[in-house]
Amino acid sequence: MRDSHCDQLLAWALPQLGLRWAAFRRVKRQVRRRVRARIDQLSLSDANAYRVFLANNPDEWARLEAMCDITISRFYRDRAVFDCLRDQVLPALASQLRAGEPLRVWSAGCASGEERYTIALIWQLQVAASHSGHSLQVLATDHNPQLLERAAHACYRRSSLRELPHAWIARSFTQRGDAWCLDPDLRGSVRLECQDLRRTLPPDRFELILCRNLAFSYFDGDEQRRVLRALIERLSPGGHLA
């Protein structure tokens, strides 16, 4: 199947899922490969045949949506963002808390956990000593149970750690074969739950919500606005959305 035919299929289908095909520009190959494999698995002739299959099999839309999950992630991805969280946002938020109150963070669309465990690392290694009266509580949600299972396991390839300082790796990870596993005490501050941001939201309020790569990259404009309103409603007074 030609790339152009696959792109036409996705440009037609994704808006019906509330997704923007234009946002997949850098990961087109990954999504095309999954769609082609699915068409072959179904013994269909081409993209047009898959359109017909979607029309006659409504449950297939969920399968297509899952094929469009993008899981590019690593520790300390987008260095400028995490430098700002380390040096400014987390210390400021902790300073606003009442005595003994935890700093509550929600990571929406946590994938396999790298970026979310980065918050735990920053807190433990850079912030906690100056705010010893407070603890960190991170709720990490994703709609993909397989990714959440990987996040719970918390073992990663060395390439996923390449942005971290070597001293952090030595202090907080244990090598097991080809994998680097996060120490259990850092995992304990992160609670994992299976939730689809577009359908289920936690009832709590948070001082910090992380959601920049999911809703504001791949969702279409209407969905982005709806999700943004819901996120703002869950921010504590003076909270940050990143």
Image (cartoon, rainbow, N blue to C red):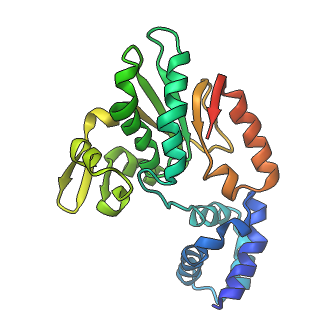
Q: Position of residue 140 (x, y in %)?
A: 49, 39
Can residue 55 be seen in the rendering of this structure?
no
> In the image, is 106 to the left or to the right of 216?
left
Camera-nearest residue between 222 and 105: 105
> In the image, is 17 to the left or to the right of 103?
right
> In the image, is 93 to the left or to the right of 234?
left
Q: Report the residue that reaches farthest toward the right.
A: 222
Please tell me whether residue 164 is drawn above or below residue 201 in the rendered image: below
Residue at position x 62%, y 85% in the image:
44
Q: Position of residue 80 (x, y in %)?
A: 53, 49
Q: How many marks?
A: 0
Camera-nearest residue between 174 and 112: 174
Please tell me whether residue 160 is drawn above or below residue 127 in the rendered image: below
Residue at position x 33%, y 47% in the image:
154
Q: Quadrant of the C terminus?
A: top right
Camera-nearest residue between 223 and 99: 99
Q: Which image quadrant for residue 65?
A: bottom right
Q: Report the residue that reaches farthest toward the top.
A: 99
Residue at position x 45%, y 53% in the image:
147
Q: Which image quadrant for residue 183?
A: top left
Can residue 209 be seen in the rendering of this structure?
yes
Q: Position of residue 20 (x, y in %)?
A: 74, 63
Please tell me whether residue 227 is drawn above or below residue 160 in the rendered image: above
Q: Quadrant of the N terminus?
A: bottom right
Q: Position of residue 200 (x, y in %)?
A: 64, 38
